[in-house]
Image (cartoon, rainbow, N blue to C red):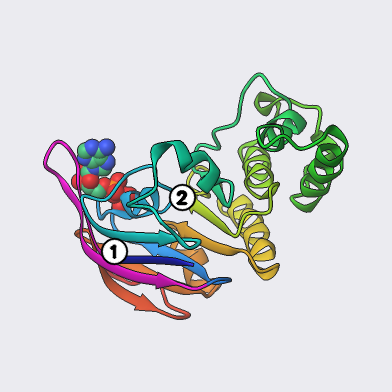
Amino acid sequence: MIEMIDVKKTYSNGVSAINGLNVKIKPGEFVYVVGQSGAGKSTFIKLMYREEKPTSGSILVNGLNLTKLRNSKVPLFRRNIGMVFQDFKLLQNYSVYENVAFAMEVIEKDKESIKTRVMEVLDLVGIKHKARMLPSELSGGEQQRVAIARSIVNEPKVVIADEPTGNLDPETSWEIMNIFETINNSGTTVIMATHNRDIVNNMKHRVIAIEGGKIVRDEQQGDYGYEI
Ligand code: ADP
């Protein structure tokens, strides 16, 4: 599903964020990416959805070689990837419903299927009753539910989340994590960068620890680790 071979990423300011990284992630896996601030977690994740290009090495996602993928093909490639961020990234002037529907409109689905599917995913994440509200009328946890609904509405094979509980209180974080768990149980691969030690240690999955742009630990059913 995802494979990185000898990947290096040096930003234009000379900072080497990823320094020779090899990894394979199979379909259906749930993977936590942990490490200190500045370790390279975000860059690692951005390389997976072609927000950044590697300086060298190759990256394969859903059978596509991202190093060879033309910029014009990136939107098509991203249809099979759901993305969730710490700061939700919702469209503030659009309702909950419209935020999620928009992801289906851009791929030209018809109005009826959009309506059915959007209500289905809003129900799945527990926010159906607030479909007409604006993001500003929702709590952080509720906004993240909307962002998750948007990420899965087109049934991607993989959902990539960068610190999805970073702005949320512990109880809300657990609720959000349970939604990711449900998504993963339906067969979707989930890759999540997180600083949440409690969640990583209690909701057990594969743990990839990054330090200095390299994988320093890769364990099935791993722990957050004491050193970070
Ligand atoms: P993490 O997510 O683990 O905090 P990042 O991938 O954000 O780590 O950052 C890794 C390193 O790359 C850091 O030294 C950071 O300052 C640098 N970096 C990240 N993004 C950029 C960028 N767009 N331009 C230059 N340097 C960057």
Q: Residue furthest left?
A: 14
Q: Residues within 10 Å of mark 1 (few under 14, many from 20)?
A: many
Tally of numbered tags: 2
Q: Which residue is drawn at the image coordinates 67% and 61% (left, top)?
A: 183
| Amino acid type of the residue tagged 1 in the rendering | Ile
Residue 209 included in the magenta stretch of the image: no
Q: CA distance from mark 1 to mark 2?
A: 15 Å
Position of residue 79 measured from the top left corner of the image (x, y, whole percent)? 58, 46
Q: In the depicted view, which residue is nearer to us: 205 or 200?
A: 205
The residue segment tinted magenta is 5-26
- Image position of 171 (left or right of 62): right
Q: Is residue 224 visible?
A: no
Q: In the depicted view, which residue is nearer to us: 46 or 34?
A: 46
Q: Which residue is drawn at the image coordinates 66% and 69% (left, top)?
A: 187
Q: Is residue 140 above or below residue 61?
A: above
Say the numbered circle drawn on residue 67. none
Ligand 1 position by quadrant: top left
Q: In the depicted view, which residue is nearer to us: 142 or 48?
A: 48
- Image position of 222 (left or right of 29): left
Q: Which residue is mark 1?
A: 210
| Amino acid type of the residue tagged 2 in the rendering | Glu
Position of residue 227 measured from the top left corner of the image (x, y, whole percent)? 26, 68
